[in-house]
């Protein structure tokens, strides 16, 4: 499922955001206090990793409105999702009349309840004239067959024929009609069997068609409920991050395992667990090898883990090639980072690196651990209840990064994540100028609250990051074009003829030949 659009209402600074289109990468620009973070917080509440919870009217309902206006049904989040072909097939098998459904919806209000919808679902419909025509042929045929059976069976068969005739009269309530129609058709079949009477093949076929039609209608309500539940089960998790957890460069493995057993890991230890997951390390295995005094195997495992993380960091961190190495010191595991291309390679603990690199490293560890664990089957939505890929909601990512590193981070979002990402930013280096259709702008007015434009509209301050980003993009393009033109001109210029080497100097008067005497 891919998030196609969403709308936030009745949440903090947002009365009605308007429908916001989303793409693979969606950047939301806006001034400070324009409500950008509120958009992400509200969207996150639809399917947070921590589980669905009630929203707080006191905290979350717009402050300028009366609290008695807020109820559990007050709408907050509406989302629209696109289904892939495999998901469409699953839905159609579950609910046949959903064969044409390509988009589904999911929404919630202040209560911890979600609703699902199937966009374009075919309405329940019946061909009343066809039903009447079949009944007009079946009922007389049954009564004609009743004339040929024993007297005691004749009355029952005629009675069931009349009951069937009455039950087949169409009602506006299709569900109630179908229940009576199924019961009457089954009773008629039983009476025919008891009496030993038979219908013609054609009449038997028509009776079967009416019974199947009524059964399909009767089963529609539970099938629809199952389909709606399936939609909610398939919703991707929303991962909202406004602060990126620290990842200390030195960890005590024994302490980590102890606190993990008690379910009391600190945020730093949770980050360490994600680091181990990304690096392919098992802290329990490392501890067991220590107890066996198998230090060689421990070192081999952490050397391999360092190579795995180094390969990824070098691909993603473009400032300079770095090397990550894990070092075991008894119960402790140190994360060490060095610059192998420097004249004097210095290896330092992760804690001693720049704040920007620490942020990027923690970001890489956290999100690769949380999102790359999904299996292919999960991503295809083939199993009910499976853990789905996450939609990442990032509030001002990359604030501590250098401008070039911010641009690298944006490329990282686009090239290295299969997840949809929605993020807010003030930085022109985080604006995808090559994909302006992915840029949204948030504005806030006293009367209307926070609203979002899908076409990047707003005042000068709102559009400032976009304006600067476009100017930088044009400047880079002009510089590239100038460099290319200069190179082309240099290549096309004629090569000057090479001057001949000067001849050896000739003396003005040649010396007389000397003839030796014989």
Image (cartoon, rainbow, N blue to C red):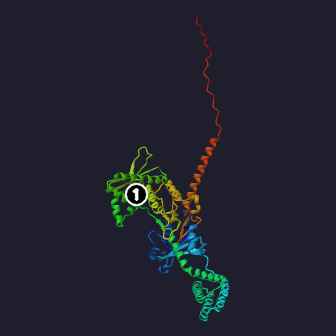
Instruction: Tell which of 147 and 408 is nearer to you.
Output: 147
Left or right side of 386 for 212:
right
Instruction: Tell which of 365 and 41 is nearer to you.
Output: 365
Left or right side of 38 for 434:
right
Place of residue 156 in the rendered image (x, y in percent of width and height, measured from the top left): 59, 92
Place of residue 101 in the rendered image (x, y in percent of width and height, measured from the top left): 59, 72
Left or right side of 318 for 150:
right
Place of residue 265 in the rendered image (x, y in percent of width and height, measured from the top left): 37, 64
Residue 108's place in the image compared with 406, above or below, is below
Residue 9 in view of the camera: no
The residue sitting at 60% across, 73% down in the picture is 99
The residue sitting at 51% across, 61% down in the picture is 426
Instruction: Tell which of 332 and 411 is nearer to you.
Output: 332
Outermost residue on the top side: it is 518
Place of residue 415 in the rendered image (x, y in percent of width and height, measured from the top left): 53, 57
**Residue that badge 1 annotates:** 281
Instruction: Give the number of callouts.
Output: 1
Residue 261's place in the image compared with 107, above or below, is above
Q: Determine whether the residue tagged by mark 1 lies in a helix, strand or loop.
A: loop
Residue 426 in view of the camera: yes
Which quarter of the figure is the C terminus placed in?
top right
The residue sitting at 47% across, 56% down in the picture is 401
Q: Examine the image and state in which quarter residue 16 appears.
A: bottom right
Q: Residues within 10 Å of mark 1 (few under 14, many from 20)?
A: some
Which quarter of the figure is the N terminus placed in?
bottom right
Q: Examine the image and state in which quarter residue 269 appears.
A: bottom left
């Amino acid at each position: 499922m891919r998030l196609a659009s969403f709308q936030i209402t009745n949440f903090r600074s947002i009365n009605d955001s308007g429908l916001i289109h989303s793409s693979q990468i969606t950047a939301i620009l806006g001034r400070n206090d324009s409500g950008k973070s509120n958009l992400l917080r509200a969207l996150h509440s639809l399917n947070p990793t921590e589980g669905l919870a009630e929203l707080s009217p006191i905290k979350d309902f717009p402050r300028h409105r009366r609290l008695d206006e807020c109820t559990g049904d007050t709408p907050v989040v509406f989302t629209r999702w696109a289904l892939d072909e495999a998901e469409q097939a699953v839905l159609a098998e579950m609910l046949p009349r959903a064969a044409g459904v390509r988009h589904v919806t999911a929404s919630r209000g202040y209560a911890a309840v979600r609703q699902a919808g199937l966009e374009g679902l075919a309405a329940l419909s019946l061909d009343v004239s066809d039903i009447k025509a079949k009944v007009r042929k079946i009922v007389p045929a049954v009564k004609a067959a009743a004339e040929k059976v024993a007297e005691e069976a004749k009355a029952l068969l005629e009675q069931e024929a009349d009951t069937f005739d009455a039950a087949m009269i169409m009602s506006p309530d299709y569900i109630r009609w179908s229940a009576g129609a199924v019961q009457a058709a089954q009773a008629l079949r039983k009476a025919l069997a008891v009496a030993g009477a038979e219908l013609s093949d054609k009449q038997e076929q028509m009776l079967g068609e009416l019974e199947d039609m009524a059964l399909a209608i009767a089963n529609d309500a539970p099938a629809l409920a199952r389909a709606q539940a399936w939609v909610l089960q398939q919703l991707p998790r929303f991962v909202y991050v406004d602060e990126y957890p620290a990842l200390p460069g030195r960890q005590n493995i024994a302490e980590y395992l102890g606190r993990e057993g008690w379910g009391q890991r600190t945020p730093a230890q949770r980050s360490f667990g994600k680091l181990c997951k990304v690096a392919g390390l098992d802290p329990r295995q490392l501890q067991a090898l220590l107890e066996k005094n198998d230090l060689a195997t421990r070192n081999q495992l952490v050397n391999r883990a360092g190579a795995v993380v180094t390969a990824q960091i070098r691909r993603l961190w473009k400032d300079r090639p770095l090397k990550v190495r894990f070092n075991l010191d008894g119960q402790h595991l140190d994360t060490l980072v060095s610059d192998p291309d420097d004249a004097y390679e210095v290896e330092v603990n992760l804690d001693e690196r720049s704040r920007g690199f620490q942020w990027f490293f923690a970001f890489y560890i956290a999100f690769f651990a949380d999102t790359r664990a999904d299996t292919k089957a999960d991503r295809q939505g083939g199993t009910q209840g499976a853990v789905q890929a996450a939609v990442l909601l990032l509030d001002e990512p990359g604030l501590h990064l250098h401008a070039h590193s911010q641009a690298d981070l944006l490329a990282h979002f686009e090239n290295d994540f299969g997840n949809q990402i929605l993020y807010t930013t003030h930085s022109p280096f985080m604006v995808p100028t090559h994909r302006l259709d992915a840029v949204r702008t948030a504005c806030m007015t006293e009367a209307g609250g926070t609203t979002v434009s899908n076409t990047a509209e707003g005042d000068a301050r709102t559009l400032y990051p976009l304006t600067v980003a476009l100017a930088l993009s044009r400047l880079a393009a002009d510089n590239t074009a100038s460099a290319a033109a200069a190179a082309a001109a240099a290549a096309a210029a004629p090569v000057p003829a090479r001057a001949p080497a000067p001849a050896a100097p000739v003396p003005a008067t040649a010396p007389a030949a000397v003839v030796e005497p014989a």
